[in-house]
Image: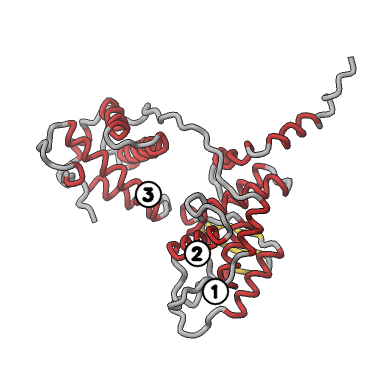
Amino acid sequence: MYDIPLALEDFLNYIETIKGKSENTVKEYRYDLITFFRYLKIRYRLVKKDVSFDDIDIYDIDINTIKRITIQDLYGFISFVDKERNNSNYAKARKVASLRSFFKYLHSKVKLISENPAIDLESPKTDSRHPVYLTLEEARKLLDVVDGQFKERDYAIITLFLNCGLRLSELVSINIDKIRGDTLTVVGKGNKERTIYLNDACIEAIDEYIKIRPTKGINDDKALFISKKKNRLSPKAVQYLVKKYVKKAGLDPNKYSPHKLRHTAATLMYQHGNVDIRALQQILGHENVATTQIYTHLNDDRLRQAVKSNPLSKNKS
């Protein structure tokens, strides 16, 4: 654990306990802001030139140092991570978001600074990326190759990813008592619960797995998916088994991951399920519909047909 300034420690506690941010989000904020403070010590000439970046001590940065920070320092930092640390636009945009949240907290919540230097900080333009996903035939092929000692468990996992669009963290956190009929309650980003509706394929796959799921000597009785050592299946183990079956299906294991299976589910629902964007947003647990809109670019024919179906499309001049 890093020795960090008190203001940063308090901020991280705030976003975790009050704002309900996930453990991963808190880690990202921590990393971004530690990187910023190390840069600041270089910029303010508070560290010797021969000290490597990762060894720069930031514990001594106090609120008086923070009060000196200007928007020029913030833009200087974004330039630094771009040129010196080869950050992509997405990585830079995340750092901008971290800075905005931190200074907003200092200014508006705990009132430790009289002005917010990040209030006008702009975020780098990010290129819109189309999600990577399996075609319908590739998804079927992936399901067909699942076998081995843990066939029922692994088949249920792949089925849930491909049908429900679960996040990896959501899948491994599933508790058996949260499955009721055709509904499943999962804990998503920001510790927010949401309801997943299970189709016939998911219900059947879960039922088949439940029949052979270990019941004795389990270290976590509530866990749905159990490892060989009778523990809750870890994210790393799920990533490994997904890549194993992707490779077995003749697909690129470096291209497809549990998150790409989530993309696949969303894409198939959008292309074949006549699901509107707001419904898809709810299914995926996106806080902002803008996040869901990447799936609306996937099927130009569908958009073309929508325009053609307008009752005014026939010219009767």
Q: Are marks 1 and 2 in contact (CB under 8 Å)?
A: yes
> What separation in Å lies between label 1 and label 3 (alpha carbons)?
39 Å
Q: For residue 87, which quarter of the picture?
A: top left
Residue 186: % across, % down: 55, 61
Residue 208 in the figure: left or right of residue 11:
right
> What separation in Å lies between label 1 and label 2 (alpha carbons)?
10 Å
Residue 314 in the figure: left or right of residue 299:
right
Residue sitting at x 39%, y 55% = 23
Disc 3 element: helix
Instruction: Kindly identify which numbered label has been placed on residue 118.
Output: none
Three-letter amino acid code at the position of disc 3:
Ile
Residue that mark 1 sits on? 150
Q: Are marks 1 and 3 in contact (CB under 8 Å)?
A: no
Q: Residues within 10 Å of mark 1 (few under 14, many from 20)?
A: some
Residue 148: % across, % down: 55, 73
Residue that mark 2 sits on? 241
Closer to us: mark 1 or mark 3?
1
> What separation in Å lies between label 2 and label 3 (alpha carbons)?
33 Å
Earlier residue among tags 1 and 2: 1
Disc 2 element: helix
Residue that mark 3 sits on? 15
Earlier residue among tags 1 and 3: 3
Q: For residue 298, which quarter of the picture?
A: top right
Earlier residue among tags 2 and 3: 3
Residue 70: % across, % down: 26, 28
Q: Is residue 34 visible to us here?
A: yes
Three-letter amino acid code at the position of disc 1:
Phe
For residue 18, above or below residue 310: below
Quadrant location of the C terminus in the rendered image = top right
Q: Residue furthest right?
A: 316
